Image (cartoon, grey):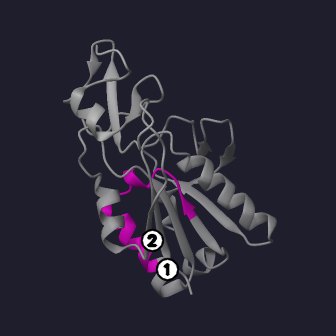
């Protein structure tokens, strides 16, 4: 029975690496898996998914997947969506239709919340309707579980701005809630 899965975590919790490994495992077992991501994620270039540890694979854009016919979608055993937080709620509903009406599992990976601890629209919809929602964990510099994605610059943690700002390790850091509230990027207060 097909299901809609959502695996979320703070930055650095290996979401993309897990997405790529999941695709590899299905392909190795002889099951065709389609990897995709929202077009807004331009960090890795045109139609590519790349993890911080160097794993990389070609993908299709979620915006193109919605144009696939039922027959094209049913060629796949599962669909794997990286950066699902950037999906529009309507796209998430489309993914649930793939599960419910075409019997193809959809496995999504993404951030739960932004740098202000507000849910992304795609994540909010996935949390509401996914059959299985699980957290991928990572740790704060203090060793506690990190749940917050702190955006920072040379002046410290950034508290205001646009929800979507594509960045990397030099722009974001996973922190526990306490150190996020305190604005501490490390053991020495800034």
Q: Is residue 142 above or below residue 27?
A: above
Q: Residues within 10 Å of mark 2 (few under 14, many from 20)?
A: many
Q: Is residue 170 above or below residue 167?
A: above
Q: Which mark is residue 99?
A: 1
The magenta-colored residue range is 80-97
- List x then y, in percent, for residue 189: 29, 16
Residue 63 within the magenta-colored segment of the rendering: no
- List x then y, in percent, for residue 104: 57, 79
User: What residue appears at the point 51 percent right and 34 percent down from the top-left corner?
Assistant: 43
Mark 1 residue element: helix
Residue 91 within the magenta-colored segment of the rendering: yes
- List x then y, in percent, for residue 92: 38, 66
Q: Which mark is residue 4?
A: none
The image quarter in which residue 140 lies: top left
The CA distance from mark 2 to mark 1 is 7 Å
Mark 2 residue element: helix
Q: Which residue is mark 2?
A: 95
Q: Is residue 159 above or below residue 57?
A: above
User: What residue appears at the point 30 percent right and 70 percent down from the top-left corner?
Assistant: 128
Q: Are marks 2 and 1 in contact (CB under 8 Å)?
A: yes
In the rendered image, is residue 68 in sight? no
């Amino acid at each position: 029975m097909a299901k809609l899965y959502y695996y979320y975590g703070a930055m650095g919790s290996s979401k993309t690496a897990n997405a790529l490994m999941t695709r590899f495992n299905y392909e190795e077992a002889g099951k065709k898996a389609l990897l995709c991501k929202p077009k807004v994620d331009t960090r890795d270039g045109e139609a590519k998914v790349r993890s911080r540890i160097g794993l990389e694979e070609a993908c299709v854009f979620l915006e193109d997947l919605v144009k696939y016919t039922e027959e094209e979608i049913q060629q796949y055993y599962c669909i794997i969506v990286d950066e699902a937080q950037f999906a529009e709620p309507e796209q998430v509903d489309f993914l649930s239709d793939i599960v419910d009406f075409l019997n193809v599992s959809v496995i999504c990976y993404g951030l739960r919340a932004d740098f202000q601890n507000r849910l992304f629209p795609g994540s909010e919809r996935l949390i509401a309707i996914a059959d299985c929602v699980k957290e991928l964990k990572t740790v704060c510099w203090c060793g506690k579980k990190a749940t917050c994605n702190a955006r920072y610059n040379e002046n410290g943690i950034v508290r205001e701005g646009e929800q979507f700002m594509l960045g990397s390790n030099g722009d974001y850091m996973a922190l526990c809630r306490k150190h996020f509230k305190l604005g501490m990027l490390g053991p020495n207060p800034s």
